[in-house]
Amino acid sequence: MNVMEPLHSSNSPTVELKSLQLCDQEGTESADSGIGDVDDLPVPQQIQISNITCDSFKISWDMDSRGRERITHYFIDLNKKENKKENKFKHKDVPTKLVAKAVPLPMTVRGHWFLSPRTEYTVAVQTAAKQPDGDYSVSQWSEIIEFCTADYSTAHLNQLLQKAEAIAGRMLPFTVFYRNQQREYFQQASPSYRSRDAQCRRMLPAVKDNSGSHGSPISSKLEGIFFSCNTEFNTGKPPQDSPYGPYRFQIQADLLFNQNTNIYFGDFYCMYTSYHYVILVLAPDGSKGDVFCKGRLPALDRSNNCFLTCTKEDDGSLSFCHAQDVILEVIYTEPVDLTLGTVSQISGHQLMSLSTLNAKKDPSCKICNISVGR
């Protein structure tokens, strides 16, 4: 058996996890797995999962006192919960069997190689007694418990932030935020677009999709409106191509980003290409979006960060810059009135291949991944 990782926690014992040969869902081991017959060892009951993070959890349970002194190890059967919506021809996730030395409970299970953020798992436990010949006698399996891992913590997001800062590049000036859509989105009668208030001619916040890092705390939770601000290097203006539609709404930058706006880092990812994306959140101070972001996302200095800045000049005007080497996706958390900007048709093409709608992050990229679940 190969030692996988010693676990260290101030509130739970140090536990040595080892890999076991995989077995089927019924708990029957293959002949060479080192597992003997089912014994009358205590069966774990009332399993409790606590202190769940994106790549760890604490587990404890009750046991009868009879035979407890014989227990030398715990076997933990951890599996991703089956998703019936997944393609039935896809290979199933390989179940993970862990063996830990018997220690006082609760104990921490940690490992980014088998735990992913925001993922539903099932877990069952078996007690075991190691025999002189190296085989194990085991108890019956416990009941199966379900739980879901957590989002990235601010510590994980700060790791992503540092990686993004390393490739952001120099800052370029810009003057407008813009948003591309189909023509119908901007028309007065647009009942097919839930993110539009046709009567009041407003763009409304909508729940962010699942694009980007799987552990991002803003996916499927934060409500906002996506804007872009990147400019072409040779013209200093927004590009004439877009993956989202041939019609563009443009608004002066200071109407969305000013001294009363807080800015947060949301995510850093790529989609199996050389392009890297940084998601930023602009939230008016004290707004619903601002309250959501506080404590969940790293806050940035609006006039001094590597991605998007708003600086007050000596004459009182505001100047704006964006990072050159990453594509910025800016989420503004409040409704935006269409009368504050202009809508016009762009002259370029709709580059659908660059759309990030529900795009999945490349888990193998060394530039934008950190050492937790992707």
Image (cartoon, rainbow, N blue to C red):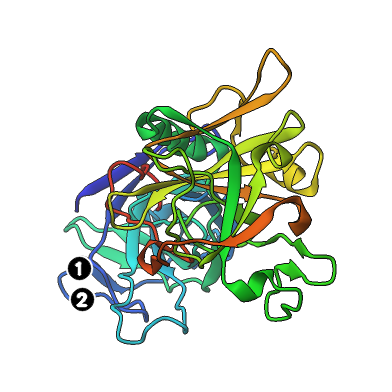
Residue 208 visible in this rendered orientation of the protein: no
Q: Within 10 Å of the Cα at label 2, are there few (<14), some (14-19), or many (20+) other Cα atoms?
A: few
Q: Mark 2 and mark 1 in contact (Cβ < 8 Å)?
A: yes
Q: Is residue 188 left or right of residue 121?
A: right
Up-down relation of residue 218 to residue 136 (above or below): above
Q: Which mark is residue 33?
A: 1
Element class at badge 1: loop
Q: Is residue 19 left or right of residue 233?
A: left
Residue at position x 32%, y 55% in the image: 363
Up-down relation of residue 12 to residue 171 (above or below): below
Can you tell which quarter of the image residue 65 is in? bottom right
Whole-percent x and y of residue 339? 77, 56
Which residue of the protein is positioned furthest toward the top in this rendering?
Answer: 314
Towards the viewer: 170 or 340: 340
Residue 360 visible in this rendered orientation of the protein: yes
User: Gap between marks 1 and 2, in whole Å?
Assistant: 5 Å
Q: Is residue 7 left or right of residue 272?
A: right
> What residue is shown with label 2?
30
Towards the viewer: 202 or 18: 202
Up-down relation of residue 343 to residue 23 (above or below): above
Whole-percent x and y of residue 251? 66, 48
Residue at position x 52%, y 63% in the image: 210
